[in-house]
């Protein structure tokens, strides 16, 4: 997907980055060793083949002159922290990190490299699979998400900080940040309606007292599959410590436009929700659709169909409280 946050680099710079990460003897020759991966709407990622045939993925943070949303600041450092945490605390398959560089002497932004995983992107192939195959993968995804959520956190908020005193403070701060992001870019939002909802229903957030690892961006498009198994989960820059009920897999329990959640719920092991949990989930739907509505302005993306779709989902999320 196209976005102004994608920090593309010249072949000479990419060679210098490969040399820094793997050594000069492994720098490839010619110009057919690198291919941009089109998946994703934030960082640029390249599939690279080294001189000895080893394949890796190089991921580069947005350029310093491009403004990002508040929750995306420091996203690459957050992703590296997430990868380290998941690899050390779970059996969930995530990429290892070959090399990471935040010095900005070779490139104008943070970057890291990881092994290339030869597998299919579940989000891209899902529609080609049978209903039974989709069901198996969705069940497996629910189980993976539950294992991630089992990681306890020291406090609510981003993995790399700052920490919030409570989940209520953390979530209200998240909503306030996206509203301010929208105001900076002139995105028309009904601040009064959102504020009113929060004022009326924020008490339900106090039931969440234990911070848990939340992937938040665990959509099918961030899952790699092969031979009937999930072999890798990618793109962890949006992870934080919070309420597991905010995860992507639960969105469709309140907003049907996001798909059919039953197989995910079976895999996760949660198929019933209390009235308080549903109320929290509805607040999280409002937050998600606010982010989706605002982020296009930070990507330089002006597709009217996308804008119409996200606005419709925000309207639906707000209507859940009518």
Image (tube, rainbow, N blue to C red):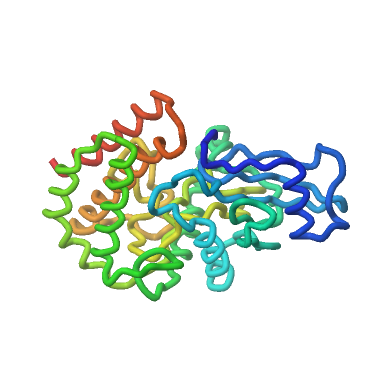
Residue 189 place in picture, x, y as percent = 24, 37
**Drawn side of residue 66 relative to residue 204, left or right:** right
Question: Does the rendering let one see residue 265?
Answer: no
**Drawn side of residue 89 relative to residue 187, left or right:** right
**Drawn side of residue 180 relative to residue 276, left or right:** right
Q: Determine the image quadrant of residue 124.
A: top right
Tell me the quadrant of the picture where the N terminus can be found. top right
Residue for point 15% across, 43% down: 192
Q: Determine the image quadrant of residue 173.
A: bottom left
Residue for point 34% across, 38% down: 185
Residue 207 place in picture, x, y as percent = 22, 67
**Drawn side of residue 225 relative to residue 255, left or right:** right
Tell me the quadrant of the picture where the C terminus can be found. top left
* Front residue (pair 109, 268): 109
* Front residue (pair 141, 251): 251
In the rendered image, the vertical position of residue 315 relative to residue 72, given as above or below? above
* Front residue (pair 113, 66): 66
Give the total of numbered labels: 0
* Front residue (pair 1, 243): 1
Residue 313 place in picture, x, y as percent = 30, 35
């Amino acid at each position: 997907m196209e976005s102004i946050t994608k920090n593309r680099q010249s072949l000479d710079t990419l060679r210098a980055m490969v040399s820094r990460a793997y050594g000069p003897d492994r720098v490839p020759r010619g110009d057919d060793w690198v291919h941009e991966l089109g998946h994703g709407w934030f960082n640029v990622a390249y599939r690279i083949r080294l001189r000895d045939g080893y394949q890796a993925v190089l991921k580069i943070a947005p350029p310093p002159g491009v403004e990002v949303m508040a929750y995306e600041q420091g996203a690459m450092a957050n992703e590296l922290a997430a990868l380290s945490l998941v690899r050390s605390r779970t059996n969930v398959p995530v990429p290892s990190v070959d090399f990471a560089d935040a010095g900005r002497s070779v490139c104008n932004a943070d970057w890291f490299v990881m092994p290339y995983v030869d597998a299919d992107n579940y989000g891209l192939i899902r529609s080609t699979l049978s209903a039974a195959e989709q069901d198996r993968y969705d069940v497996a995804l629910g189980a993976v998400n539950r294992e991630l959520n089992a990681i306890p956190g020291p406090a609510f908020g981003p993995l790399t900080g700052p920490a919030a005193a409570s989940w209520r403070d953390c979530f209200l701060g998240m909503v306030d940040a996206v509203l301010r992001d929208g105001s900076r870019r002139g995105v028309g939002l009904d601040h009064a309606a959102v504020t009113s909802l929060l004022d009326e229903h924020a008490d339900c957030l106090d039931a969440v007292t234990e911070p848990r690892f939340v992937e938040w961006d665990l959509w099918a498009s961030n899952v790699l599959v092969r031979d009937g198994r999930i072999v890798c989960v990618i793109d962890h820059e949006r992870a934080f410590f919070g309420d597991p009920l905010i995860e992507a897999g639960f969105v469709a329990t309140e907003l049907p436009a996001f798909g059919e959640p039953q197989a995910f719920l079976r895999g996760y092991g949660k198929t019933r929700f209390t009235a308080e949990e549903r109320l929290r989930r509805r607040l999280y739907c409002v937050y998600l659709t606010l982010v989706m509505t605002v982020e296009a302005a930070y990507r330089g993306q002006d597709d009217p169909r996308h804008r119409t779709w996200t606005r419709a989902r925000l309207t639906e999320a707000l209507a859940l409280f009518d």
